[in-house]
Amino acid sequence: MIRLLLLLALTFGLASSASADDIAATGRGVVRVVTIAVVDDQVVGFGHGSGFAVAPNRIVTNAHVVDLAERYPDNVVVGIVPTEGTKSYQGKVIAYDSQRDLALIEFTGARLPPSALYTGPMNEGDAVVSLGFPGNVDLATARSAADYIRPMTPVRSEGVLSGRRVLSDIEVLLHTASIARGNSGGPLLDRCGRVIGVNSAITRGEEGDSTFGFAIADTELAGFLRDSKQPYASIGTGCTSIEDRLRQDSDADARATADAASARRDAAAQDALAREGAVEKARTEAAHTRENVMAIAGLLLVAGALVIGSAGLLESRGQRRRGDLGGVDRRRRGARRDHRVRAAAVGRGRRAAVGVAEVAVGDARCGARQADVHADPRTQPDHDLVERGRADRMGRQGLHEPQDAICRCEWALRPRAGAGQ
C-alpha cells in the first residue's frame, strides 16, 4: 500500500512538474514592450509588442515596435512589463536595425533570465513554439489600459517549421505557430526553449488561405547582436527537451531493468556453466585421483609381491643355507659316528683278536686239563668228560670282558649212553 501511494505521488508529481518545462523557463524572460507617446503632457499614442531578454537588463524586440521611440525619443516612453512581479520598468533603445527589423532595449530595476540562441541546424517539420502577447487576446480580455502594464504570462502557441525564406533581403523562418499583432518581437523557440527566430509578421488569410508566420532567422539575430556588441549565449547541440529527457530516462530505466534482467540471466547461466565446469572438473579430478590410487595400489601390490617373493627367496636361501649347514652338521655327526663305529669295530676286532688268543690259550689249557683228567685215575670209563661253558666262553668272545674267556673249564663226568644198564 505504501509503495502504491509513493508511486501515485511520483506520478502526480511528475505530471505537475511537466508544465515547468524548457519553454516555461524561457517564458520567464519574455516581456511585453509598451510605447506611450506624450505631447504636452497628453498621451497621443499607444502601442505594444513583445520581446525577450538576451542579458539580465537588455531586451530584443522588433524595430517596428519601438519605431516611434527611435524617431521621437523625447516624446515616446518605452515600458518593459515582465511576466512576473508587480512592477513595470522604463527602458530606452540602445541599438536599432530597421533592415533586419530588430532593436535592443536596456532597462533598470530588475534582472531577467536571459534566453539562449540555438545556432544548430533546423529541419522542415521540426516543432516550434511561439511566445508573446497577441493583441487580439488583449482586446478580448483587457478591461482597461492598466491591464497592458500589469505583469502576466505570455501566450503560447505551437506549430512546425515550414522552411526558410528571404524577405526583403533578410532571411526569415516560415512557420505555422499561431501569432497576431502584439506577437511582434516575441521569440520563436525550438522544443528545448532555445531562440531560433524573432516573430515579425504574418500573412493575411483571404478566401480560406492558410496563415503563416514570419520570424527573423537566428542568423540575422546573431549578426545584429554582434553588430551591437552584445554578448549572448548560444547552443549548437541538438534539442533534448524535458519531455525527451523524461522519455529517455524512462527508456533508460526500461533498458536498465532489461539489462539487469539480462545480466541476472547471464549471471545465472554463467553460474550454471561454472557449476557444470566445477562438477566436470571434480569428476575429472576424481577420475584422475582414482586412477592414481589404482596405480599406486598396483605399484604397492607389485612391491608387496616383490617383497613377498624376495622374502620367500631369502627364506628358501636361508633354508638351503640351514640345510647345507645341517647337512654339514649331519655329515660331521655321521663322520664322528662312523669314526666311533670304526673305532668300536677296531676295538672289537682288537678284543676279538685278544679273545681268540685267549681262547686259544684257554683251549690249550683246557686241552692240558683234559689230558690231566683223562690221566686221572679217578676218571670213570663209563663217563664222558663234558666240557661245559665252552659255548659260553665262545659266545662271550664279543664282550668287553676277555678275562671271562680265560679257561675256566669245568669238566664233569656224564655217564655214557647205556652205562649202568
Image (cartoon, helix red, strand yellow):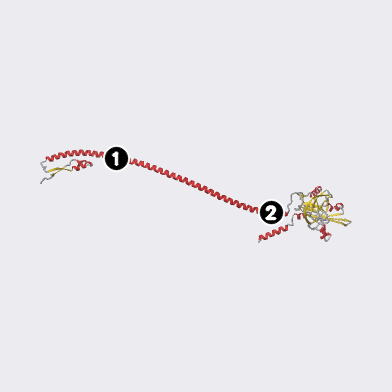
In the image, taking residue 405 as reference, residue 138 lies left or right, namely: right
Neighbourhood count class around disc 2 (C-alpha, 10 Å): few under 14, some 14–19, many 20 upward = few
Q: Secondary structure at mark 1?
A: helix
Determine the image quadrant of residue 325. Answer: top left
The residue singled out by tag 1 in the image is 338
Q: Farthest residue toward the right?
A: 40
In the image, taking residue 313 as reference, residue 121 lies left or right, namely: right
Disc 1 marks a residue whose amino acid type is Asp
Residue 251, label in figure: 2
Disc 2 marks a residue whose amino acid type is Asp
Residue drawn 29% across the image and 40% down it: 338
Q: Nearer the viewer, mark 1 or mark 2?
A: 2
In the image, taking residue 358 as reference, residue 241 lies left or right, namely: right
What's the CA distance linking mark 1 and mark 2?
A: 124 Å
Q: Nearer the viewer, residue 232 or 383?
A: 383
Up the image or down, 389 lies above or below 37; here it is above
Count of numbered tags: 2
